[in-house]
Image (cartoon, grey):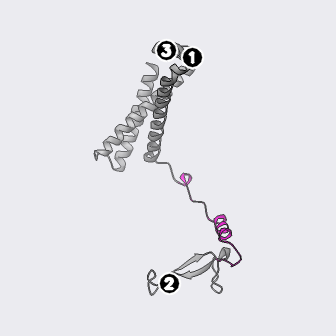
Amino acid sequence: MFSAATRTGVLGATRTSVSRSLATPAVRAFVATPMRQTEEPQSVVAERARKHRPVSPHLSIYQPQMSWVLSGLHRNTGVLIGGAAYMYAAMFGLAPAFGLDMSSAAMAGSLATLPAVVSISAKALISGCLSFHVFGTMRHLLWDSGRMVNNKGVITTGYAAMAASALATGYLTFF
């Protein structure tokens, strides 16, 4: 990458030594710094460096692990539940201003007119989010008490939360 004779590298970078207080006397460290010509503004140097900067790796390089997948799913179900609750509360509060009937009888009547596939899908989505979030919360509370914090415990509680959530979702959807 660097030429020993010219001490310049790609993009016109020069090697400068780090101060003696940071480097050991026996080893001398070099840091690549972009070379700037006097007629060139700093923005041009920054843009040139930005074009050749490697993209930082993201989630695509990591193998999915139960701990962070379930943690993200727990957070997303919480956001969905909270968002739905806020929207329902806003609808309920603003319904009289728009002349809408939000009584229990009116809501039950309008939900009864939905096709069975839509009704069952909606019940499965709502009960799935609620049950997974409840069992995920129990899992986190167990960890907060200092129990099951090792790798085996994390995997065990993950499978337990998923199984309990699946059973609760099935029960709440069809019964």
Q: Which mark is residue 28?
A: 2
Looking at the rendered structure, the secondary structure element under dot 1 is loop
Q: Which mark is residue 108?
A: 3
Residues shaded magenta? 35-61
Magenta segment includes 48? yes
Viewer-side label of 3, 1: 3
Callout 2: few (<14), some (14-19), or many (20+) C-alpha neighbours within 10 Å?
few
Residue 116 screen position, x and y as percent: 55, 17
Q: Which mark is residue 114?
A: 1
Q: Earlier in the sequence, mark 3 or mark 2?
A: 2
- Three-letter amino acid code at disc 1? Leu
Q: Earlier in the sequence, mark 1 or mark 2?
A: 2
Looking at the rendered structure, the secondary structure element under dot 3 is helix
Which residue is rendered at x = 46% and y = 33% of the image?
81
Callout 3: few (<14), some (14-19), or many (20+) C-alpha neighbours within 10 Å?
few
Q: Where 125 falls versus 60 (above or below)? A: above
Q: Where 143 falls versus 97 (above or below)? A: below
Residue 24 screen position, x and y as percent: 44, 84
Mark pair 3, 2: CA separation: 77 Å
Residue 82 screen position, x and y as percent: 45, 34
Is 137 on the left or on the right of 39, as rendered? Answer: left
